[in-house]
Image: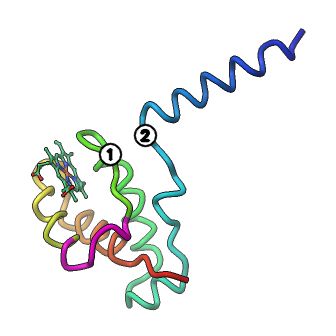
Amino acid sequence: MMKNYILPSLLVFVFVMSSCGFDATKYYTPALVNAEKANVALEQLVAGRTAYIENCKDCHRLFKPSKNTAEKWNKEVNRMQERAKISNEQKANIISYLSSEISQ
Ligand code: HEC
């Protein structure tokens, strides 16, 4: 009996996940190596990732961090600060996170 619910539930789950465009694997999870390379605390990158996912997805999809250079992210996030209503600290964390992805 229970088996009959598994497939429909799975389909609903997949539909919900894809309709909001959220794919956590695209927004890399920072590790110590990224923090050391960027010369910032790991906590700052982790906070930046959370702030990015929470504040930047309302109007468009979230872009992959490796899409832009650090210089470009700096420009873009500054441009988006007012729209996203984020503090200077959140902005700095988001820029650090987006700029810190390195190929491992
Ligand atoms: C209130 C809506 C809104 C929020 C919130 C928002 N954006 Fe945007 N964003 C836009 C719009 C509209 C555009 C397209 C027009 C433009 O580039 O100004 C855009 C464009 C961009 C672009 C350029 C896209 C491209 O393909 O060149 C980047 C990068 C970006 N946003 C990043 C962010 C980040 C990072 C945040 C969170 C700090 C954020 N956005 C939050 C509305 C928003």
Q: Check disc 1 and report its element: helix, strand or loop.
A: loop
Please determine whether, in this image, residue 11 is positioned above or below residue 68: above
Please determine whether, in this image, residue 25 is positioned above or below residue 73: above
Judge from the rendering whether residue 95 lies leftward or rightward of residue 50; answer left or right. left
Residue type (three-letter) at the residue carrying disc 1: Arg
Please determine whether, in this image, residue 43 is positioned above or below residue 80: below
Read off the magenta span.
Answer: 65-72
Residue for badge 1: 61
Task: Looking at the image, tell me whether mark 2 or mark 1 is earlier in sequence order.
Answer: 2
Specify few, some or many for label 2: CA neighbours under 10 Å numbering under 14, 14-19, or 20 or more: few
Q: CA distance from mark 2 to mark 1?
A: 7 Å
In the image, residue 29 lies at what x, y percent?
52, 66
In the image, residue 12 lies at what x, y percent?
60, 22
Please determine whether, in this image, residue 51 is positioned above or below residue 96: above
Residue for badge 2: 21
Q: In the rendered image, which quarter is residue 70 located in? A: bottom left
Q: Do the residues under discs 2 and 1 have CB atoms within 8 angstroms?
A: yes
